Image (tube, grey):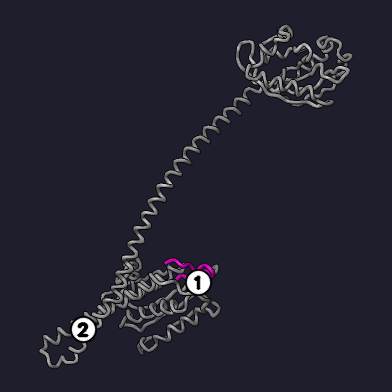
Amino acid sequence: MTHPVPTPDTTMPEGISAGPSGSGDAGDVLRTPTVDRVVSLMPGFVYVFNHTTYSNDYTNRSVGEQLGYSSEEIRDFGAQMMMHIVHPDDHPKMSEHLARIAQLDGDDSISFEYRVFRKDGRQRWLRSVDAVFDRAPDGSVLRHIGCASDVTIEKEAELRLEQMNAELEAKVSERTRDLAKLNGELESRIAERTYELQDAVDELEQLTYIATHDLKVPVNNLCRLGLMLGDNAHLLAPDQAEQVGWINDCATQLSAKIQGLVLVAQIRLSSVLPSELLNLRGAVMDAVGRFEATMGQGARPVTIKVADDIFVDFARFELDSILSAIMDNAIKYADPSRALEVTFRADLLEGKVTLLVEDNGTGLDGERDRDKVFGLFQRAHKEPAGSGISLYCARRMLLRRGGDISVEGHRGKHAVFNLQFPKRGETSGDG
């Protein structure tokens, strides 16, 4: 009989002899008070299996605790012992195990797991460690000694784990098939939606082309007609002259809208301009210089708190357009009751540049006006007139490169624009 336990020391204790090769009775040899005390302390039970008679020559009393049989009953089974005790499904494996024992050299040992039936009919798992005990003069194995232990709890847990793993793998496989099916359906829907969006983009591009090209001619003609009528307004009645002025205003607004659409189309549909490392302080000073003449005599000098060593990775034309839009906004919405003050302040943190532009004009409500400030053709103030395009375009230019712009402030006090530039080398090309 066999069962996995720590490999036993096959050196026989004092007072035990295997006897001459192929002779002697193992039961008599092993039955001594000393040996009985030793084997009674071992886990499981000890046995000597005879390869000639195919039966156990010796089994210690611990077999009763493991299998419910006495040593005498095990011995009385004779060659039918395995047929009575070992599970039928494990008979082939037991034969293979005995064959491996017959091939062992010297003091080598071998382990084996198998199922047995107790005397009460219950099935148990045993693990044995076996070694050669007695050889014939030709070296063939006559008997082997082994120690078997009950590992039913361990084995049942192992089998249960295998079953759970198999069930889990089956569920994972089923879920994987479901996900593959869903992914296929999703890809099909995405492809369909992409086609619809591309069709919509194509229509939008066509409409944009019409708005920015085909409408320019009649609008320009209308503007010229208005100017011609304005030049001869002295020949018209007062109410007619007023109507001509109204026509000119409408034509001017319409022309500004068309120009705005052209700019928006260029930003949305054109490729991203190549970027370069630009000195931010120099760009700010250039923008301020372009608007010095329009700031008014009462305006205070623009404060520029931008270090000389701060650079941004941006397209020069777009950076100039953004800074010009900010300066134009500050001047356009200056408060007539106080001198205009504009401050540029830049910070560099972990490679990311932040530029704050603050003015003391009519101000903005950060919560209420944010969407209007950057909305296309939207304005936070009714006066003075404006197109509602420049700040929209400024934000689009920043967004497509991985930056952004936001605004805070208070009505009647001030406005603060916060420009976030992308880190060097992280410029995005998304629109």
Apparent side of residue 236 relative to residue 370 in the rendered image (left or right): left
Q: Which residue is mark 2?
A: 248
- Secondary element type, mark 1: strand
On screen, residue 414 above or below 202: below
Which quadrant: the C terminus? bottom left
Quadrant in which residue 129 is drawn: top right
| Residue type beneath disc 2 | Asn
Mark 2 to mark 1 CA distance (whole Å): 44 Å
Q: Which residues are magenta?
A: 418-431
Frontmost residue, 183 versus 255: 183
In percent of width and height, residue 412 lies at: 32, 75
Residue shown at 28% from the left, 73% from the top: 211
| Residue type beneath disc 1 | Val
Residue shown at 53% from the left, 36% from the top: 169
Q: Which residue is mark 1?
A: 353
Q: Crowdedness of circle 1 by 10 Å Cα count: few (<14), some, many (20+)?
A: many
